[in-house]
Amino acid sequence: MKRFLLAVLLAAVAQGAGPALAQQSKVADWTIEKRTQDTHCNASRGDKDKDDENRDYVIVITYSEKAIVIVMIYDGWEWEKVGEILRADVGTDDADIMKKAKWEVMDKTTVRGIFEYDQSMMDRLSKAKRLTLDFEDDDDDSIEMQMPRAGEALAALKFCEENRK
């Protein structure tokens, strides 16, 4: 899961941290971690999509009192311009979260969304079974990532955040 570690590192960079990792725990197939050189925690999950040529995908969620950061890695993407800003509708299996949200290309297979902290967004993510990105004018790159037991993972992430000192 080389891409999984990349996602963890990218999320650390998103919060201005170095790559050192500290305490980890598992909740279902999610990894919850507190890093030594960062003041925040991550919830991350990687998988292979058997319905899509066994392509790897990873999702990393982290947050602070100011922002929610979501990093998505999918080895079926081939973004060409690092730093490019893409627009995508973000949703779950049962709720729209945000229309035309900004996503930054981090590398050819990775995008990152940084959103102002909103408890209702966290609530919708915790109830989700899937997270979808529907890119403007680009159905080929739109994606749906599975998020089983997201509520448990985000509760563990919240516990990690509240006890990170």
Image (tube, grey):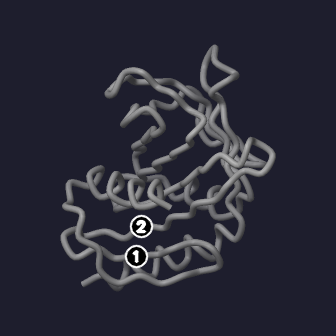
Going by the numbered disc 1, the residue's amino acid type is Glu
Going by the numbered disc 2, the residue's amino acid type is Asn
Secondary structure under tag 1 reads: strand
User: What label does residue 95 carry, if any?
Assistant: none
Q: Residue at x 20, y 54 (%)?
A: 16
Q: Residue at x 81, y 45 (%)?
A: 51
Q: Position of residue 153 (x, y in %)?
A: 58, 73
**Relative vertical location of residue 89 with respect to residue 153 in this rendering, above or below:** above
Q: Position of residue 75 (x, y in %)?
A: 56, 41
Extreme residue in the top direction: 137
User: Looking at the image, which is closer to me, 159 or 85?
Assistant: 85
Crowd class of label 1 (few under 14; some 14 to 19; many from 20; radius 10 Å)? many
Residues at marks 1 and 2 touching, judged by CB atoms closer than 8 Å: yes
Location of residue 65 by image quarter: bottom left
The residue wearing badge 1 is: 33
Which is more N-terminal, label 2 or label 1? 1
Q: Name the side, left or right, on which 52 lies relative to 76.
A: right
The residue wearing badge 2 is: 42
**Relative vertical location of residue 83 with respect to residue 15 in this rendering, above or below:** above
